[in-house]
Image (cartoon, grey):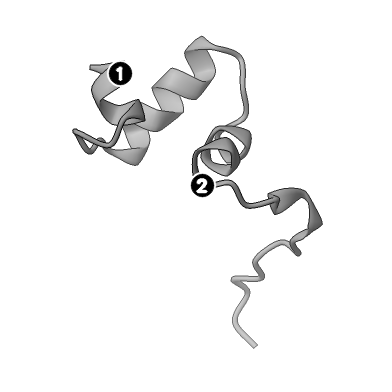
């Protein structure tokens, strides 16, 4: 299953991605960053507070 997700043949839930990240001791953001190729280290945190 993981190889199918990795190669884009299958989709999965965020819950599954979280479990995979936890199993390999990698933060979910790092896992996502490596998948899409974007550098998330330079981004600002999302502010969800209501004004």
Residue at x 61%, y 14% (from the top left corner): 25
Where disc 2 sits, the SS reads helix
Residue at x 58%, y 36% (from the top left corner): 34
Q: Is residue 36 left or right of residue 44?
A: left
- Furthest toward the front, the residue is 7
Image quarter where the C terminus lies is bottom right
Residue wearing tag 2: 36
Q: Nearer the viewer, residue 24 or 1?
A: 1
- Give the Cα distance between marks 1 and 2: 16 Å
- Furthest toward the bottom, the residue is 51
Check disc 1: other Cα within 10 Å, few if <14, some if 14-19, many if 20+.
few
Residue at x 30%, y 18% (from the top left corner): 3
Image quarter where the N terminus lies is top left
The mark nearer the N terminus, 1 or 2, is 1
Q: Is residue 9 above or below residue 50?
A: above
Which disc number belongs to residue 38? none
Position of residue 21 measured from the top left corner of the image (x, y, whole percent) = 51, 23
Q: Is residue 13 left or right of residue 49?
A: left
Q: Nearer the viewer, residue 49 or 19?
A: 19
Position of residue 10 measured from the top left corner of the image (x, y, whole percent) = 19, 33
- Furthest toward the right, the residue is 42
Residue at x 31%, y 30% (from the top left corner): 7
Which disc number belongs to residue 3? 1
Contact (Cβ within 8 Å) of mark 1 with mark 2? no
């Amino acid at each position: 299953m993981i190889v199918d997700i990795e190669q884009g043949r299958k989709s999965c839930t965020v819950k599954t991605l979280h479990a995979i990240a936890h199993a390999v001791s990698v933060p979910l953001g790092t896992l996502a960053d490596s998948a899409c190729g974007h550098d998330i280290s330079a981004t600002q945190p999302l502010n969800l507070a209501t004004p």
